[in-house]
Image (cartoon, rainbow, N blue to C red):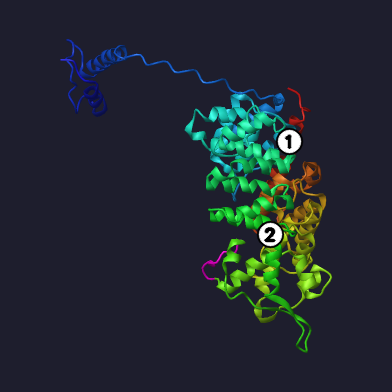
Amino acid sequence: MISTWDELVTAALLGTERRTPPTRPRPGQDAAAALLDAAALRTVQRRAGLLPVAARELPEAAPEDPRPSLPPAARRRLELLLADRAGPGGGAGRRGSAPDLVELLPQWLTAANGHGYRAPAALLPALLDAARARSDLRQQALALAGPRALWLARFNPQWKYALRGGPAPAAGTHPSDAGAAQRVWQEGLFSERVALLSSVRRRDPAGARELLATTWPTERAEDRLMFLDSLREELSLADEPFLEQALSDRSRNVRATAAELLSALPGSALAARMAERARSCVGLDRTGAAAPRIAVEAPHECDGGMQRDGIVAKPPSGRGERSWWLSQLVEATPLHTWCERFGVTSAAEAVALPVADGWQPDLHAAWCRAAVRQRDGEWSRALLGPATSPPAPEGSSWRDPAKLLSALPAAERAEWVAEFIATHGLSEAFRLLGVCAVPWAEPLGRAVVDALDIARDAGSYPWSFSGVMGLAERCLDPAEADRLEVLTALPDDPEDGTGAPGAVGYWAEAFQRLVGTLRLRATMRAELAGQVGC
């Protein structure tokens, strides 16, 4: 009797002492040896009995990527960064003086793309794996991987994220090639179409809008939303007719996005309609004996016209309907409306006016969102106030200063945050630092390092400032490394017994890691520039 494969596997798993193998041992042979002989025989029989399958067509060749390859030293660096990503991360309590390579990978990818390099073909699988595990890497990783990443992703379901979207450039196309661009737009993958639309938008805003209009009625709602979002770049009044049509879209999300884009154009018809509604709700009361103040009468209803213009009728939980409608109206109103409405000459004067009946938090919060949406530096500056002022409580214009800062020029942003840190320390500064340009300007970098040095002298532990320290490692100018070397020394603990025991040692370790990371970043920059030999 020939034993079945399943019987042999069962006996092997359970053991010959618990399950008698379905075999006959030869004289002098034990049961286990007989089982292995039978398994070997059945294996040969199974393989010999396989029927040949039809040969598949070979896949088309991977597209060419004409970009230059990485310098040898930079290629080795990428291998190290990708190999280290699977190791233990830094985290809030990271110890040791070695740089955290995991957190340097995003910066390295951005710098490599700035040089216009392509990723080595042999490292594409590791790069796609890294971007699959960390969504924050995807944009830069797919840009470096180029068209071959899309080709490769078709053969591995784990990399299907690259086919759904992302900035990977369309293979074999250039925006200036109208015929190729049309073919990609009509036949390409979604990610290729998004990349193409974004690329055309940067070179020819009207051409991108016209390209989108050719297929707009037949696109899926989620795709229309993504394509519409690409119009944020180079947004102008020339886009208004298209966006006005999108206000009647079948998808609520598309309508909301179209309304948001139109409200970012102070000269649009939607902005004018919102301003007219807002003026009927907010005005200056000069009737009292006291100084003039802003009077507010929130809307009593949210009619169909308001809803078509993007006003959401149902408020979030815990929010009153009328204040919710008012906030949306004010947020979508051109900010220059208010100086005229209140008879003042500047945003600072408007912001300084008292507001009656407790409406100031709602009004100022809406102005903040309007200033960010309209990228209005004057109003952002007025709502922020001086950096030396104490942070205002929740519900005031200070509720999200980081967003207001994003509307200011990079140099002014850094100067404001540096002054804020010098006055208030680091406890409130983490989100503010996140909106500052990298590498940090010299005054900002100095303010951060000085604040860390003060915290060390006060006896705090460095992990209380691990978030800021991590930002410093990634954002300080690498040229600062030599100046910071003095902070790596290990001073004596305070003689008076103040401070946390052993904290100075931890601080020396943290500053050693900071200096080491800055020097590593400088080396990586030189490698990408081809200034480091083999």
**Image vertical order of residue 221 relative to residue 460, above or below:** above
Q: Quadrant of residue 346?
A: bottom right
Task: Give the x, y percent position of residue 32.
Answer: 24, 19
Task: Give the x, y percent position of residue 169.
Answer: 64, 33
In the picture, the disc for residue 114 is 1
Dot 1, how many residues are within 10 Å of its Cα: few (below 14), some (14-19), or many (20+)?
few
In the picture, the disc for residue 263 is 2
| Most foreground residue, 410 or 300 | 300
Element at label 2: helix
Mark 1–mark 2 Cα distance, whole angstroms, equals: 33 Å
**Image vertical order of residue 405 relative to residue 301, above or below:** above
- The overriding secondary structure of the stretch rendered in magenta is loop
Kindly identify the residue that appears in the image at 44 percent across and 18 percent down: 56
Per the rendered image, the range of residues in magenta is: 310-318
Horizontal side of residue 15 vs 414, given as left or right: left
Task: Give the x, y percent position of residue 330.
Answer: 68, 68
Whether residue 311 is in magenta: the answer is yes
Element at label 1: helix
Number of residue marks: 2
Horizontal side of residue 378 vs 503, given as left or right: right
Kindly identify the residue that appears in the image at 61 percent across and 74 percent down: 299
